[in-house]
Amino acid sequence: MILVALILILFKITAATALVQLVREKESNIVMIQSELYTPCCYRDQSKAVCQKGYRCKCLCLWMCLSDLCNVYGYKGKKGGGIHAVVNKRANHCGRKRVEIPTEAITSIPFEQRTTLEDLARALGLSKSTVHKHLREGKIERHSSSIKPYLTDENNKAQVQHALNMLEPSTIPHQPVFRHMYNVIHADEKWYYRTRSTQKFYCAPGEERPRRTCKSKNYIEKVMFFGGQSRPWFNEQNECTFDGKIGI
């Protein structure tokens, strides 16, 4: 008997937990659940409180709830005059109050104190889950800031002067045209490390592990690639005679 009682208690706890999860869904789903639970509770005989046959199995299989809950919905429907007495009339006006984050509360925090969700939640005095929920809803925006070169007034003037030097002097100032630049080569180089200080490999069971050596991890050898590119050349038939790729 004790074992049976424990099984019934565990079953009721599981059913109550499942019902709470269902109630937390959207309002349309709640109305549908209440309607489905009320329908089998319609009495076959007005003189006797007898529900439709098999409603207990239906409640257990479909909605994972107890038959007592169906009896409650049936009593409410009979007393109130139908399904309208069963449907929740406090939608959007009950439950846990939503935590709103004002825009001024976020902007008043320095940028250095809101680089991560943990820092922002700590500065706002809220939990990380609440801040993450607002991030998913678009009320908080994530921005990646890249370092830009600081240009002085002399740098800006030098850029403008360089652009003016690319113009044909004979076309200034009425119809300025850029030079053909067939005799200009753009060069660039790129440095690469020959290897990394830590490298991950995927090996078979029992396979000999690779061993890498270097005199110092702070001075790993580098390899430089140097490339040049110029403007392509075309003949009178609009055929490319030189693609401008000098090579690496």
Image (cartoon, grey):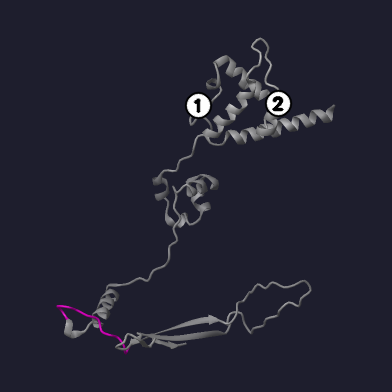
Q: CA separation, marks 1 and 2?
A: 27 Å
Residue pushed farthest right?
Answer: 1
Label 1 belongs to which residue?
Answer: 90
Residue at figure coordinates x 29%, y 88% from the top left = 236
Q: Quadrant of the N terminus?
A: top right
Of residue 132 and residue 12, the one placed in the foreground of this image is 12
Of residue 35 and residue 216, the one placed in the foreground of this image is 35
Where residue 65 appears, x then y in whole percent?
Answer: 67, 30
Q: Secondary structure at mark 2?
A: helix
The disc, 1 or 2, on the residue closer to the chain's N-terminal end is 2
Where residue 243 appears, x then y in whole percent?
Answer: 39, 86
Graded by Cα atoms within 10 Å as few (under 14), some (14 to 19) or many (20 or more), the crowding at tag 1 reads: few
Residue type, label 1: Arg
Q: What range is drawn magenta here?
A: 172-184
Seen in the image, is 37 located left or right of residue 176? right
Q: Secondary structure at mark 1?
A: loop
Per the rendering, the mark at residue 56 is: 2
Where residue 62 appears, x then y in whole percent?
Answer: 66, 33
Seen in the image, is 71 located left or right of residue 29? right
